């Protein structure tokens, strides 16, 4: 039964197609099951409900605890949480990052109480947000935010990021990481856009599942797929606000990364705080139980997001009382409640079971999953931090991987007249707020939640300006503007007159979640004025965009000779951008989203043909139709690549057929470079208006000057399915195009095959 459902999902998303469901669902070995059952049989109802309760560390910290470096725990509060309320899990930092020693001390104290002072001695599972590397541990390795990672199109790097982050979590004594974010970012105003792997479900699935495999490789750390489901398209663009989408669209564009990462063995899933078409995910039995468990076969732990059961009552207004909220979310399928500030969940759930509203067997299901997770992570046998693991924390080798990731993320969007790389003898003005900011390179979730407290960041990594200054070139600096206000725009323009080229680094300073809400996607006025003032001098301008989402730059883009998109590249970002500007690295990143040109024209690359028609009634790009600043997949290089010889292995395939595709890429320039080969498909006619193209494969190649490589893909019929009107994957016969590097091939699918039911539509 499950296998059939799984096949149906594989139809929606091809990466699911290889292998069997049985190979993927992490069914615990018999010995673990016996151990968990034995524990469970000895637990009181209170102990069970406690295992489902997660509190934030502030609840157990002393009032005068320092906010950083280490946490002073209050023994009485800790006992109240772990002994009296039997809390099975704790999360978060107080103010910000701890040293590894600080983490070890805190975890040791918590486990002392859990293992020595409770009846059954079950260790606490500590959860943390290491979302772009070990961002809450001082000296940890910090990677580009996911959006930049996606621009690398390098799944091996995603895997390495996962491995390093997992190792550094383990080295810190932390076993549960709330990453990766697998939301698909299809609303660029959204302040969590940078946490996503961009707008394409296939790319997000590929990067995400590799990161999960890396992170969980050691077996000691659980990854968390978040935030299930449909969080990445709030209509308002504000965080935690509703998406208005059909089930069909959610399945087509938002479910695939979660399906792929569940299949890759992810141990936990966190729920979306918002709602889809009025249904809060935390109260949705359909999405949490029918789809996630029933169709995807997920057997791990489902955790709520921050206070989101309470929010069913206080914000969503679907639960008349707090107790109703608890009932609804437990019935929907949650296992752990990130309460996180009090014990109301614990009290209400106890009451609901005692009065018979929720059967104890339902509690047992969740507790069995939680205990299985703890057992499989090795916590039951080794609850304390492993001092030996610290050797794998924050190594030079890991920093080198992060730097490589930052370099590979950087995306060259324009290079008129070969203004880049900067000439050796060029006199260079550096200006703009992002040039001298380490917080802007790192973005949110860096040492602090907002990431904007520069005083907390380490001294050693360099800003872009510092990285440029140390390279022995003629580099001068004038601030120009802050992210929001002018400082000395006239002085910057005067300085520009004295140099050969101006590098203007603009964008956004760090933010996270709701504090990052905006109502206007334009780059702030002060920064636009700075760029315009420099451009008015007639000197060539290289724009460097350091930002978590695509702030609109159409007013200044055409006047810039070079444009470099850096995303939020992390601690090594200054060096990486300097590598690109000076030609020490040949950029090969590609945009993982559509960069809008107009504030209100927010379209994705996989739009419908009708959306291309503009006011003049044509499908040529232009205002009112398809007119992005830069398309998904845009990315130049200091060399050039040519595509030739697109070959399709057959003119026709049947519903179960496979289509080999080959294409040859040649480096036709004079420098070694990396090229990501993107393969798109398009169905010419379908019952529902088909997207103009869908990414169905990518491969990254490194080529020396003059070198050619033939790249091979195999398309299966599953790659060609789409989610039909009833929410089920369907393959309709007809003509299809394969598009790679400007070449197009055509083939036909014969016969018809609707995939088996995927748990039904709705
Ligand atoms: C965020 C989650 C995060 C959690 C714990 C929430 O506000 O939405 O992504 O994992 O806090 O810090």
Image (spheres, rainbow, N blue to C red):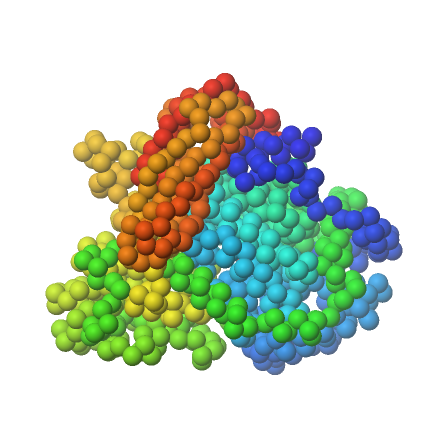
The residue closer to the viewer here, 709 or 241, is: 709
Q: Name the side, left or right, on which 134 lies relative to 527.
A: right
Which is more toward the observer, 292 or 380?
Answer: 380
Looking at the figure, which quarter contains the C terminus?
top right
Q: Position of residue 517 (x, y in %)?
A: 40, 58
Q: Residue at x 52, y 37 (%)?
A: 13
Q: From the viewer's perspective, is 496 left or right of 686? A: left
Q: Is residue 470 left or right of residue 761?
A: left
In the figure, is residue 717 to the left or right of 424? Answer: right
144 to 665, vertically: above or below: below
Q: Nearer the viewer, residue 329 or 650?
A: 650
Q: Residue at x 42, y 46 (%)?
A: 199
Among the 4 quarters of the image, the one containing residue 705: bottom left
Decide: is 72 above or below 484: below
Give x and y (percent) for residue 354: 80, 49
Q: Residue 372: image x %, image y %? A: 75, 53
Q: Quadrant of the N terminus?
A: top right
Pinpoint residue 299: horizontal percent, then vertical percent.
69, 45
């Amino acid at each position: 039964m499950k296998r059939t459902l799984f096949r149906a999902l594989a139809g929606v998303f091809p990466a699911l197609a290889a292998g069997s469901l049985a190979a993927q669902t992490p069914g615990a070995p018999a010995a673990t099951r016996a151990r968990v059952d034995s524990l469970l049989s000895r637990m009181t109802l209170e102990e069970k409900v406690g295992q489902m309760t997660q509190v934030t560390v502030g609840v157990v910290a002393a009032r005068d605890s320092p906010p950083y470096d280490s946490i002073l725990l209050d023994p009485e509060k800790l006992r109240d949480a772990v002994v009296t309320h039997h809390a099975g899990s704790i999360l978060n930092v107080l103010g910000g990052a701890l040293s590894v020693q600080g983490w070890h001390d805190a975890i040791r104290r918590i486990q002392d109480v859990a293992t020595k002072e409770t009846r059954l001695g079950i260790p606490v599972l500590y959860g943390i947000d290491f979302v772009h590397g070990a961002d809450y541990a001082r000296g940890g390795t910090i990677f580009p935010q996911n959006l930049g990672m996606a621009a690398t199109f390098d799944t091996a790097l995603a895997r390495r990021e996962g491995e390093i982050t997992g190792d550094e979590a383990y080295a810190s004594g932390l076993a549960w990481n709330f990453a990766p974010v697998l939301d698909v970012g299809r609303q660029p105003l959204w302040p969590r856009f940078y946490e996503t792997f961009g707008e394409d479900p296939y790319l997000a699935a590929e990067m995400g599942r590799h990161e999960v495999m890396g992170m969980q490789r050691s077996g000691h750390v659980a990854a968390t797929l978040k935030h299930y489901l449909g969080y990445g398209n709030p209509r308002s663009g504000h965080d935690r606000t509703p998406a208005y989408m059909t089930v069909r669209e959610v399945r087509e564009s938002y479910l695939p990364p979660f399906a792929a990462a569940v299949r890759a063995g992810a141990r936990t899933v966190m729920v979306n705080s918002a709602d889809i078409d009025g249904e809060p995910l935390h109260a949705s039995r359909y999405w949490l139980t029918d789809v996630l468990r029933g169709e995807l076969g997920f057997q791990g732990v489902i955790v709520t997001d921050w206070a989101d059961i309470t929010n069913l009552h206080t914000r969503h207004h679907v639960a008349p009382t707090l107790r109703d909220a608890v009932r609804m979310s437990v019935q929907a399928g949650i296992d752990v409640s990130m309460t996180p500030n009090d014990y109301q969940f614990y009290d209400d759930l106890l009451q609901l079971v005692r009065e018979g509203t929720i059967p104890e067997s339902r509690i047992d299901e969740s507790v069995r999953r939680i205990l299985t997770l703890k057992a499989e992570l090795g916590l039951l046998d080794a609850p304390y931090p492993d001092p030996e693991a610290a050797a794998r924390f924050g190594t030079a080798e890991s920093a080198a991987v992060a730097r490589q990731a930052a370099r590979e993320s950087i995306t060259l969007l324009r290079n008129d007249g070969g203004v880049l790389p900067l000439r050796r003898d060029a006199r260079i003005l550096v200006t703009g707020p992002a040039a001298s900011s380490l917080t802007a390179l790192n973005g949110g979730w860096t040492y602090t939640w907002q990431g904007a407290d520069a005083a907390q960041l380490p001294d050693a990594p360099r800003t872009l300006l510092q990285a440029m200054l140390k390279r022995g070139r003629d580099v001068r600096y004038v601030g120009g503007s802050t992210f929001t206000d002018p400082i000395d725009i006239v002085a910057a323009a005067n300085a520009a007159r004295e140099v050969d080229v101006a590098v203007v680094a603009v964008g956004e300073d760090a933010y996270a979640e709701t504090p990052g809400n905006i109502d206007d996607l334009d780059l702030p006025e002060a920064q636009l004025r700075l760029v315009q003032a420099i451009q008015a001098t007639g000197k060539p301008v290289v724009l460097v965009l350091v930002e978590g989402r695509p702030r609109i730059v159409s007013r200044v883009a055409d006047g810039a000779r070079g444009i470099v998109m850096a995303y939020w590249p992390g601690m090594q970002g200054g060096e990486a951008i300097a590598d690109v500007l000076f030609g020490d690295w040949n950029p090969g990143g590609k945009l993982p989203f559509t960069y809008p040109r107009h504030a209100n024209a927010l379209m994705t690359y996989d739009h419908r043909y009708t959306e291309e028609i503009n006011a003049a009634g044509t499908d040529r790009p232009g205002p009112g139709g398809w007119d992005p600043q830069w398309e998904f997949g845009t990315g130049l290089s200091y060399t050039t690549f040519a595509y030739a010889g697109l070959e399709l292995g057959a003119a026709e395939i049947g519903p179960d057929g496979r289509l080999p595709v080959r294409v040859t890429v040649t480096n036709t320039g004079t420098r070694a470079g990396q090229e990501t080969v993107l393969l798109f498909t398009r169905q010419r006619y379908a019952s529902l208006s088909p997207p103009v193209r869908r990414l169905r494969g990518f491969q990254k190649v490194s080529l020396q000057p003059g070198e050619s490589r033939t790249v091979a893909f195999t398309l299966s019929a599953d790659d060609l399915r789409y989610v039909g009107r009833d929410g089920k994957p369907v393959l309709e016969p007809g003509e299809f195009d394969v598009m790679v590097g400007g070449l197009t091939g055509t083939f036909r699918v014969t016969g018809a095959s609707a995939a088996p039911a995927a748990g039904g539509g709705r």
